[in-house]
Image (spheres, coloured by chain):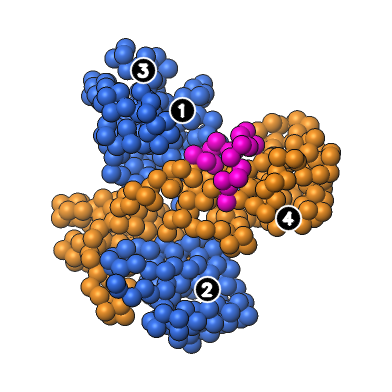
Chain colours: A orange, B blue
Amino acid sequence: MPARRTVFFISDRTGITAETLGHSLLTQFSIEFDQVTLPFTDSIERVDAAMRRIEAAGEATGFRPVVFSTIIDAEIRNRLRRVNAVVFDFFDTFIAPLEEELGLRSSHTIGRSHGMTDARAYNVRIDAMNYALSHDDGAVTRQYDEADVLLVGVSRCGKTPTCIYLALQYGIYAGNYPLAEEDLMSGRLPAVLRPHRRHLYALTIRPERLSQIRAERRPNSRYASLRQCQYEVARAEGLFAQEKLPVSDTTTMSIEEIATTIIHTCQLPRRLY
Amino acid sequence: MPARRTVFFISDRTGITAETLGHSLLTQFSIEFDQVTLPFTDSIERVDAAMRRIEAAGEATGFRPVVFSTIIDAEIRNRLRRVNAVVFDFFDTFIAPLEEELGLRSSHTIGRSHGMTDARAYNVRIDAMNYALSHDDGAVTRQYDEADVLLVGVSRCGKTPTCIYLALQYGIYAGNYPLAEEDLMSGRLPAVLRPHRRHLYALTIRPERLSQIRAERRPNSRYASLRQCQYEVARAEGLFAQEKLPVSDTTTMSIEEIATTIIHTCQLPRRLY
């Protein structure tokens, strides 16, 4: 069994940037890591406590811990450098060359990237999320003309999480409409969607996977049966082809991949960065 | 007016890691950037097209564009290096020292960090989100015993987006209960919450901000009036103090900050990394 290293993500704010960057690197190595996030490390006392914790992990495992850091405050960051561990500091690495290229000094202000510095951005995000929640599952269709995109597909193919992700991450207004059996039988786009044709994006999924997902909610139901899933997916895909809708097969895609593909294909406006 | 640089985030997958890195760094400079994400740059043809686009931006603005890259494929990455722009390559920078420290070769596999490599993690995430959606706003209270955390607070203080963020990002089961006027009048914890006391986390907000937020939904209503907001917040804060609940004032916090604070305070289990 390979040795288990402990990895720390440390930041003077949320630590989300350190986690995201660290995870991206760690997924390139096929070993398991024990992962610990130490957010809000914003004083000498706290960084000292963090350093004790990091070194204790090193002693317990017999391996130097790996530390990914996004600490902005120079004094705290310099102190962290003394820890008996490997420290990868994202700001140390990139800020100096970026300052040189831009011909500007950085502000060395903590936590702007996941803090609330911009009330407008906050409102956009919350509005988009409220939109996604109230236009989920075809419940409300009257504001479809405000949608940046409307996802269509059979029940449980990934529409809801994608809409919410688009809202939270990008401030995109995304509604979704689940194709019900009567829609599938008619072989036509539901009337409520027709005026919004250019905002439609279709999601599909392999029937075997759909059946698995549905069975977790309603085991042994007709709804979850492979036969029913095969029927619905075949009808839905026929409709998408006939209407020439852009379509993604979500079977092996993460929510992030589905969302990014939709933005890219439809050239959607990102309201948040 | 300062010159506006164009910044590109380029990746052979979603580009989310490149965006996270780039945004964190750019927020340290108090100038505005034009930002473009070029995801799915996974072939020589696509990187050539991306390079043309990057260089065109440089010619149009008169400034070398800044490029943040997370391309794993060595051939594509090397080709990108020829572009007439400043390229910050995340993997080039960190993978080699990490390989050395770990004594392992990296897999050079694209896109694992935001791809669906783990069906279990996917299910946890979707289950947690379904939980958040079905336990939003006190609509369903019967599965409160499954919650990792239950957020309580007055209407519109940030409970719903926080619950959804906790689910999507960390696979945490978070429900929420809005304190209605009868709850506030009684001065006691609602009966439905009492068995779950140790999972409660309170959110509060400054009445002025609450009034603004509510006015966007129901302008000129009693619900949005400053007086009503002052009353509700005062009663809610009294209840939180009396019950000794952990509490965050969300007035100037982002969703990420609220979520991270709750995880940190309650030592919640992260089911996703």
In the image: residue A240, left or right of residue A139? right
Disc 2 marks which residue?
A: B72
Disc 3 marks which residue?
A: B181
Q: Amino acid at mark 2?
A: Ile
Q: Is residue A152 above or below residue B235?
A: below
Disc 1 marks which residue?
A: B137
Q: Residue at x 61, y 37 (%)?
A: A142
Q: Residue at x 54, y 30 (%)?
A: B134
SS class, disc 1: helix
Q: Chain of mark 4?
A: A
Q: Are marks 4 and 1 on the same chain?
A: no
Q: Chain of mark 3?
A: B
Quick check: marks 4 and 3 in contact, CB under 8 Å? no
Q: Residue A140: within the magenta?
A: yes
**Span shown in magenta:** A130-148
Locate residue B193, reporting x and y percent.
Answer: 39, 20
Look at the image and tell me whether residue A189 can be seen.
Answer: yes
Picture quadrant where residue A26 is located: bottom left
Which tag, 3 or 2, sits closer to the chain's start?
2
Q: Amino acid at mark 4?
A: Leu
Disc 4 marks which residue?
A: A245
